[in-house]
Amino acid sequence: MEQTGGVSSAYGASLAGGGFDFVKFVRQPQTIVRILSWIFALVVFACITTEGYINSSHSSDAKCFFNQNDSACHYAVGIGVIAFLACVGFLVLDVYLPFMSNAQERKYAVMADLIFSVGRWPHRFSWN
């Protein structure tokens, strides 16, 4: 729990019910990172769908640029779509979070964000 002016609050619950300040919201580092993640997800999705498939001169079938394996392009497009939707969803959740007065709902929102963020980390580390 965090302390705010001598009053303890769970997940910022003491701040619930206040007005929405758009400028303050956009200036938060978390919002900036979410918007950048949204843009990068859009770029990944757009690059793979527009330039990821090529036609060879002797075949009319479009093949994936990455090792001529369609699964690689499907995977990249899927990850791009999931990342795009997750960024939009968590950005909307960040807007809605200050208006949640129920600490249990706030807890679920924060835990969902944490679980989604941690779920992306294991592939970045090599344990061997």
Image (spheres, rainbow, N blue to C red):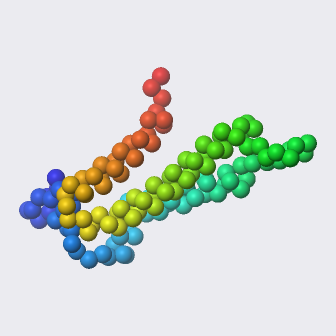
* Residue at (26, 77) in percent of width and height: 19
Please identify the quarter of the rendering in which residue 6 is found. bottom left
Residue 101 vs 73, above or below: the answer is: below
Residue 75 vs 107, above or below: the answer is: above
* Residue at (71, 37) in percent of width and height: 69
Q: Is residue 85 left or right of residue 114?
A: right
* Residue at (42, 59) in percent of width and height: 89
Q: Position of residue 102 (x, y in %)?
A: 19, 61
Q: Position of residue 73 (x, y in %)?
A: 66, 44
Please identify the quarter of the rendering in which residue 28 is found. bottom left
Frontmost residue, 1 versus 84 = 84
Most extreme residue toward the right is: 58
Q: Is residue 21 visible?
A: yes
Q: Position of residue 47 (x, y in %)?
A: 67, 54
Q: Is residue 99 left or right of residue 88?
A: left
Most extreme residue toward the top is: 128
Most extreme residue toward the left is: 6
Q: Is residue 29 visible?
A: no
* Residue at (61, 54) in percent of width and height: 45
